[in-house]
Amino acid sequence: MLGKSSVRPLLFISLGLFMVACRGAAETPVSFTDTPIPPTSTETFTPEPATQTPTLPADTPMPTIKFTAIDTLPPTPSPTSTELPAGYRIVPDVVGMHYLDARHVLYGAGFTFLYSDVFDLDQPFGTILEQYPTAGTAVKTGETIFLYRAFQAPGMWVGEKCRQLLITTMSGRLLFGVYLHEGDVYEIKTDFRYGWTSIYDYRMVLLDEFDNKEEEHMVFIPEWTAWYVLSLGPYEVGQSDLDKYPDGVPSGCLWVYLIEE
């Protein structure tokens, strides 16, 4: 075991060696390298550029823009032709034609016809005003087409004045138009000696009449205000009478009186 006297020299020797080592370290230069500190990882925000309309060169044609409709209407179905049953044909349109032309068209289409006269002051005589069945209807070949033919007649006045009757053909009727008011009471009188005196509505539907050989007047009350047709006849005269009276055979008078209540 060492004594205190031997330990002390060892302590000084160790201290001296430690000082020598420190001096050598102090004389050796220490070099430092500037190492950049990496930046802290952060999210970077890049603003989106504002939308700008591209500018086309002057010689560049403008593009064509096509619009597509969202709601579109369904296509209209095209009519399909259907064959008619055997023995049927389509009725032609003859309204507006003269009845002689209408007759030619209907006969050519395989139909027959009947017509009824309608008193009309606006349409020329013989014009077809209506037809039944209507144009475009499929009808069996040979069926009858009903036509309404316009006719005009000289006007008849209401009052004390006589309407002079003249016969200009060997047979026929004398027709006159007269405008009567609903609810008024009229007396229709004549000394015409042929056939009947009849009153019709404008479609020649018979409303009343009397035999000229048995009576000379009748009382008529219209159900509506309108034009009516007075018909006298039928009549028959000889050619000798027509030759004797070139302007018409005098045949009496026709009166229409308004009876005062």
Image (spheres, helix red, strand yellow):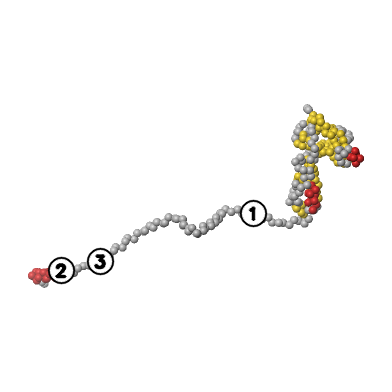
Q: CA distance from mark 3 to mark 2?
A: 24 Å
Crowd tier of the residue under label 3, counting other residues whose Cα lies within 10 Å: few below 14, some 14–19, many 20 or above: few
Residue 179: % across, % down: 77, 35
Which amino acid, mark 2? Arg
Residue 119 or 131: which is nearer the viewer?
119
Callout 3 touching callout 2 (CB < 8 Å): no
Which amino acid, mark 3? Thr
Q: What is the secondary structure assignment of the residue under circle 1?
A: loop
Q: What is the secondary structure assignment of the residue under circle 2?
A: helix
For disc 3, the marked residue is 33
For disc 1, the marked residue is 76
Mark sitting earlier along the chain (3/1): 3
**Residue 121 in view, yes or no:** yes
Q: What is the secondary structure assignment of the residue under circle 3?
A: loop
Q: CA distance from mark 3 to mark 1?
A: 88 Å
Residue 204: % across, % down: 80, 40
Callout 2 touching callout 1 (CB < 8 Å): no
Q: CA distance from mark 2 to mark 1?
A: 110 Å
Question: What residue is shown at x 91% (from left), y 40% (from top)?
Answer: 240
User: Quadrant of residue 258 in the image?
Assistant: top right
Which amino acid, mark 1? Thr
Residue 39 or 216: which is nearer the viewer?
216
* Mark in the foreground, 3 or 2: 3
For disc 2, the marked residue is 23
Q: Quadrant of the N terminus?
A: bottom left
Vertical side of 30 occupied by 253: above or below? above
Mark sitting earlier along the chain (2/1): 2
Vertical side of 57 occupied by 4: above or below? below
Q: Is residue 253 left or right of residue 89?
A: right
